[in-house]
């Protein structure tokens, strides 16, 4: 039922998207229309409309045209109305743009309605984004948890590296920046302003888009990862198995870094924190071995934990201790990477472990 509601919500935005694309394609075709001389015989200026009649010749045939422009902004119409009236009074020739496939169709101005198409497209996204957010973030997390419930490592717990929030955020940032920043600069700004503003904004928009494409590509290639672990304790060990949703290429070793980090409050700016690594160790595991599922890969992880290190502590903001397990494989644009927050505690003498009977 939830999926039906999400699809219905997303479908509400499709007419807006189709409408916006139709305007964009139709107005872009105006730049392929043929320019010919025109003699303006009549001009009438209204608040929301400019009416005109003019004669033009195309392929030796005389036509009477009345099309002015597809844009209907009052300020734009007032400006072109004054310009047309000036040409009519002076008797000078103007120009019009003729549709080669239908010479009876002509316009005096071929100003595209790109701003209108962007606004309509944004209205369509307003329906799609909430549906996508709920489907990929809320419902997706539940699906990942159920899918990884059988990862080796129990007794203990399963920790999920879910990259969908970061990916979704960058994808939305890329869409918004490209549509509402980069596109208007390239399409609507005068050349000098486009060069000035574009030199600052376009590289930033391009960088966000590149990061979004990279995150999407990595997620498609590797999917979510899960770390099934036994209880970890100070003076003991961390052991478990990392499973990738999609198979990692054969023969690739996994570089695993296990670190203890203390997060403290910045003494200058109380709203900021700084991370300090207390202890760190990196190991290279053997190449991943196929799991019980042929499309997945599993890596065994084992780290001894020295005595004297602090245990996981999230009780105070600005004075926290957490343990992080970071796994990397391969290199280049689409290397594998996953980060897990691992709970590590100090087991007091006589305290039973989770798998022991009391």
Image (cartoon, grey):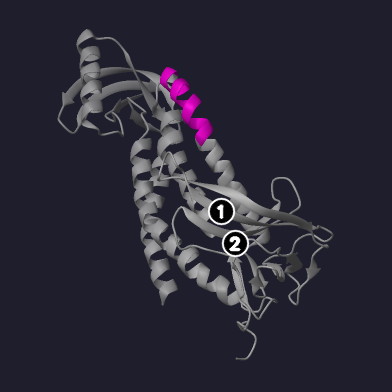
Estimate the x, y position of residue 27 in percent, counting from the top left. 40, 36
In the image, taking residue 113 as reference, residue 156 lies left or right, namely right
Figure quadrant of residue 99: top left
Figure quadrant of residue 35: top left
Estimate the x, y position of residue 208 in percent, counting from the top left. 53, 41
Assess whether mark 1 and mark 2 are in contact (beta carbons under 8 angstroms).
yes
Depicted 347 relative to depicted 212: above or below? below
Query: Which residue is at a point 56% across and 64% down the rendered structure image?
Result: 312
Query: Which residue is at a point 41% across and 62% down the rendered structure image?
Result: 131
Task: Please say whether residue 25 is visible from this viewpoint.
Answer: no
Q: Label 1 crowding class (10 Å Cα cut-off): few <14, some 14-19, many 20+? A: many
Q: Earlier in the sequence, mark 2 or mark 1?
A: 1
Q: Looking at the rendering, in which quadrant would you find the N terminus? A: bottom left
Instruction: Read off the residue under disc 2.
Output: 310
Instruction: Read off the residue under disc 1.
Output: 262
Q: Which residues are magenta?
A: 192-204
Element type at mark 2: loop
Element type at mark 1: strand
Q: Looking at the rendering, in which quadrant would you find the C terminus? A: bottom right
Figure quadrant of residue 81: top left
Estimate the x, y position of residue 141 in percent, counting from the top left. 52, 68
Estimate the x, y position of residue 332 in percent, counting from the top left. 73, 45
**Of residues 197 and 22, which is closer to you in this image?**
197
In the image, taking residue 33 as reference, residue 84 lies left or right, namely left
**CA separation in Å, label 2 and label 1:** 9 Å
């Amino acid at each position: 039922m939830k999926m039906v509601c999400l699809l219905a919500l997303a479908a509400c935005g499709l007419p807006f998207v189709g409408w916006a694309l139709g305007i964009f394609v139709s107005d872009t075709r105006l730049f392929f229309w043929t320019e010919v001389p025109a003699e303006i015989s009549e001009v009438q200026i209204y608040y929301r409309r400019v009416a005109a009649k003019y004669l033009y010749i195309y392929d030796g045939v005389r036509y009477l045209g009345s099309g002015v422009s597809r844009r209907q902004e009052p300020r734009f119409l007032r400006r072109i109305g004054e310009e047309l009236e000036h040409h009519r009074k002076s008797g000078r020739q103007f120009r019009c743009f003729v549709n080669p496939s239908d010479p009876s169709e002509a316009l005096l101005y071929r100003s595209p309605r790109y701003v209108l198409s962007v606004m309509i497209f944004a209205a369509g996204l307003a329906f799609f984004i909430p549906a996508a957010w709920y489907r990929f973030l809320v419902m997706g997390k539940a699906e990942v948890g159920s899918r990884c419930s059988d990862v080796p490592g129990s007794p203990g717990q399963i920790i999920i590296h879910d990259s969908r929030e970061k990916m979704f955020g960058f994808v939305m940032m890329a869409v918004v920046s490209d549509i509402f920043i980069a596109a208007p600069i390239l399409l609507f700004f005068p050349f000098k302003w486009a060069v000035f503003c574009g030199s600052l904004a376009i590289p930033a928009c391009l960088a966000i888009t590149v990061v979004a494409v990279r995150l999407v590509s990595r997620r498609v290639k590797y999917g979510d990862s899960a770390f099934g672990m036994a209880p970890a304790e100070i003076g003991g060990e961390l052991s478990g198995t990392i499973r990738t949703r999609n198979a990692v290429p054969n023969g690739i070793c996994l570089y695993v870094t296990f670190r203890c980090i203390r997060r403290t409050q910045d003494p200058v700016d109380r709203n900021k924190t700084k991370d300090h690594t207390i202890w760190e160790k990196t190991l290279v595991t053997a190449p991943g071995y196929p799991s019980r599922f042929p499309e997945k890969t599993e890596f065994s992880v084992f780290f001894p934990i020295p005595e004297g290190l602090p245990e996981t502590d999230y009780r105070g903001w600005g004075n926290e201790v957490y343990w992080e397990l970071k796994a990397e494989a391969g290199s280049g644009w689409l290397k594998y990477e996953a980060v897990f927050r691992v709970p590590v505690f100090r087991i007091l003498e006589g305290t039973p472990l989770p798998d022991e009977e009391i």
